Image (tube, rainbow, N blue to C red):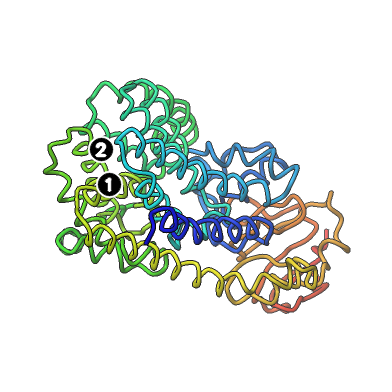
Amino acid sequence: MDKKKLILLVWVPIILLGVLNLLTVFTPEMGFDALWYHLTLPKLWLFKQKWFFDGGLLYYSVMPRLTETIFIPLIKLTGYIGPKFVQYLSGIGISFFIWKISTKLNLSTLLKSVTISLFYGTWLVSWQSGSAYIDLFRTFLETVALYFFVSGSWKKGGIFLGLAVGTKWLSLGSVAIYAVAFGLPLILPALLLSLPWFIIAFKFTGNPIYPLFSPLLHQSFSSVGVIIKNVLLLPITVTLPFDDFLSPLIGLLVVLTTISLFSRHKLIKKIALIGLLGSLFSVVLNPPSSRFLLPYLPALIISSVYIVSLLKDPLRNLFIYLVIISSLIIFGMRIIAVKKYLPFLLGRETQNVFLTKHATRLPETFIDTDDYVENNLDGNSKILIDKLHNLYYFPFNYDHTSWIKSSEGYDYLITIGTNPSEIKAELLHTNDIGIQIYKISK
């Protein structure tokens, strides 16, 4: 096939996925962690100007929160759309810097296009591009860091690694990995940029890296037996987790990256080391997840495609066709997944109708199915919530039983699955998914 036509064929599913991902930015958030704390913490800050919630439901509140801090004004202005758009732009930005790094390595336009497809044409990147998780933003920061390290600027690279640490403690592992590949000096700017988050954590908990090494996360790493199995079967391990599936080619990328470690190209060897050590780090965590592999995926892709660039046809073209087929498969899967949003996007369903329709996929999530809370409760009253776990969609200020010392003085109790005869309050309403609204007698 003509090279220009082949480049076009590589880009078609990428562009289609970009459009599809943009549409999902404007759909209701359904991600568990996003509804649990990524969106809920900044929304609570707007209500309370409170940073830390002691123990209980929101024990993650003192973790590094650079992304969630960025979400605060966006939620105020746009609700969940702004935070989701940050993720969408992060996916585009990562692709841009993968292209720039590939350009520095003198890859052809066709193979640079392949690197973009290998990243953007994955299931995980696609669904996260329309979510309010933070993994793509962390990956963007670490990819920019990789670009600066490849460009010879360890100070700028260290700064962006520090910002990544301020997004997620797991990026401390990235600091160690990059130090192995690019030298120890980068640790200084990385730690200086992330220092405020250590101070915040120490101020509220006495542990500068809370909740790591606390009773809440006492099993951060898998058992020795599981680690050995995951490492020995690494290409299979990173391909199997369908809860956070990447693409059918990830195992092959691990194999090619391992081969590139023996390249004579010193820069490729360093990039490959980042990809391989990052992959190993992601599978020793408990539980392993492709979300933890995501920040190292650009390095895996770039080092793998470099090896492919050294191959002759028909092997090189075979790889390119496999990449195209993989991205088309992912696009088909995403079409099926996004289909459920069409009634909402077309204005045939309200947000609450949509959420109620999919309530079984939103366990322990507050959904005001019939707008009773919005229309009948006084937003200035004192509201206590119990049992429910994911509270982003609650419209008013509230407290949760997990972080208060006394339930005295509240006007309403919002809960689920209780026996009204055992509650010292008047049951006002039970909505379509069993959420109960009680009026507490003074």
Q: Height in image: 123 above or below 66?
A: below
**Tag 1's secondary structure?**
helix
- Image spot of residue 161 (x, y percent): 39, 32
Residue under pointer 1: 278
Kindly report the distance in space between the C-alpha atoms of the residues bearing marks 1 and 2: 7 Å
- Mark 1: amino acid: Gly
**Tag 2's secondary structure?**
helix
- Image spot of residue 254 (x, y percent): 23, 55
- Image spot of residue 149 (x, y percent): 32, 28
Quadrant position of residue 291: bottom left
- Image spot of residue 292 (x, y percent): 36, 52
Tell me what residue is drawn at x 37 percent, y 21 percent.
Answer: 189
Residue 42 visible: yes
Residue 404 visible: no
As drawn, the label of residue 177 is 2
Q: In front: 202, or 286?
A: 286
User: Which circle's residue, 1 or 2, is located before the other in the chain?
Assistant: 2
Q: Height in image: 396 above or below 94?
A: below
- Mark 2: amino acid: Ile
Q: In front: 248, or 440?
A: 248
Q: Is residue 199 left or right of residue 255?
A: right
